[in-house]
């Protein structure tokens, strides 16, 4: 009986896959936000977009960047070839499922008005996209700083 082999890739590919996932989800969340914001104009629109972008940059630089740096360091410490799904710790997959469930719940209820939900989605989406750039730098061999601690 032959066992199924784990799909293994190199560290470079794990870093690039992480970047693609983070930026892809960031783009998706921003597209949801922009779709909802088409219904608004004037100051509510300006305030929502400004709030979302400021929130996104704050989350990116004070939260997600640190998470990305830890993931990068973890990937760099892995064997030369590792399971393709190892670009995130297994505990992170649980957090992802919880966050997706909360997002679906908020999108399909009227608990939070769309104008505010758009700012939240834009903030998280922008933070994910901005933070994904660290993965690309390391994956393409252009680290902007020494390896994350």
Image (spheres, rainbow, N blue to C red):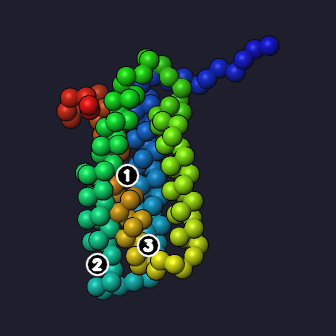
Q: Residue at x 55, y 46 (%)?
A: 94
Q: Disc 1 and disc 3: Cα gap in Å?
A: 16 Å
Tag of residue 47 = 2
Local packing at callout 1 (Cα closer than 10 Å; few below 14, some 14-19, many 20+) is many
Residue 41 appears in which quarter of the rendering? Answer: bottom left
Tell me which corner region of the image, top left, top right, bottom left or bottom right, holds residue 18.
top left
Give the distance between the C-alpha atoms of the residues marked 2 and 3, in whole angstroms: 13 Å
Looking at the image, which residue is at 31% across and 60% down?
56
Q: Residue 128 carries which label?
A: 1
Q: How crowded is mark 2: few (under 14 residues within 10 Å), some or many (20 or more)?
A: some
Query: At 43% across and 17% down in the image, what residue appears?
Result: 80
Label 1 vs 2, first from the N-terminus: 2
Position of residue 119 measured from the top left corner of the image (x, y, whole percent) = 37, 70
Residue under label 3, please give it. Answer: 117
Q: Is residue 81 above or below residue 123?
A: above
Q: Which of marks 1 and 3 is nearer the N terminus?
A: 3
Task: State the image quarter where residue 121 is shown.
Answer: bottom left
Q: Determine the secondary structure under disc 1.
A: helix
| CA neighbours of label 3 inside 10 A, class few (<14), some (14 to 19), many (20+) | many
Mark 2 lies on a secondary structure that is helix
Which quadrant does the N terminus fall into? top right
């Amino acid at each position: 009986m032959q066992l199924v082999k784990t799909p293994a890739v190199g560290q470079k590919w794990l870093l690039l896959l992480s970047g693609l996932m983070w930026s892809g989800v960031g783009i998706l969340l921003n597209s949801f936000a922009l779709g909802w914001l088409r219904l608004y104009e004037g100051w509510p629109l300006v305030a929502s977009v400004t709030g979302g972008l400021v929130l996104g940059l704050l989350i990116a630089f004070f939260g997600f960047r640190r998470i990305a740096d830890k993931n990068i360091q973890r990937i760099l410490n892995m064997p030369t070839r590792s399971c393709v799904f190892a670009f995130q710790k297994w505990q992170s997959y649980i957090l992802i499922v919880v966050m997706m469930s909360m997002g679906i719940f908020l999108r399909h209820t009227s608990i939070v008005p769309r104008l505010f939900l758009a700012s939240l989605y834009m903030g998280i989406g922008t933070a994910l996209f901005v933070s994904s750039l660290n993965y690309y730098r390391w994956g393409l061999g252009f680290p902007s700083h020494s390896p994350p601690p």
